[in-house]
Image (spheres, rainbow, N blue to C red):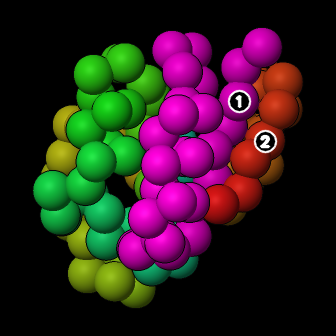
Amino acid sequence: MTRLHQLNRLHYLAHHQDEMLLSIVKGDALLLIEEAVLKVIQNDSVLEQANQLSLAVYVLEKDALAHGVSAENTVYTLITTEQWLQLTTEYDHHMSW
């Protein structure tokens, strides 16, 4: 079963970060919203794991623009709010962190 992991924070408590890393598996996807979009410009362990597992990483465009995150990146895909809604239908489960 595939899962869409929705992250909205830049930093998490260590035990939450560990839980997150343990729950992300091949076939899942990440959606970065709000301040979590800043993870794409940091050396972040969640994004490193997503890369190792070849997961799709999505970034909400309006939040990226609000936080000054560049749209020129091949590691993640910028999506609109409408695309976010469509994305939720493509995964069996959703997890908000």
Q: Amino acid at mark 1?
A: Arg
Q: Most extreme residue toward the bottom, as rendered? A: 66
- Label 1: how many Cα within 10 Å (few below 14, some 14–19, many 20+): many
CA distance for labels 2 and 1: 5 Å
Above or below 1: residue 61: below
Q: Quadrant of the C terminus?
A: bottom right
Q: Nearer the viewer, residue 5 or 86?
A: 5
Above or below 53: residue 51: below
Residue 71 at least partly seen: no
Please give the range of residues in magenta.
Answer: 1-29
Whichever of callouts 2 and 1 sits on the residue coming sooner in the sequence is 1
Q: Secondary structure at mark 2?
A: strand
Q: Residue at horizontal 18%, vertical 64%?
A: 41
- Left or right, 71 with reference to 54: left
Q: Nearer the viewer, residue 54 or 88?
A: 54
Residue denoted by label 1: 3
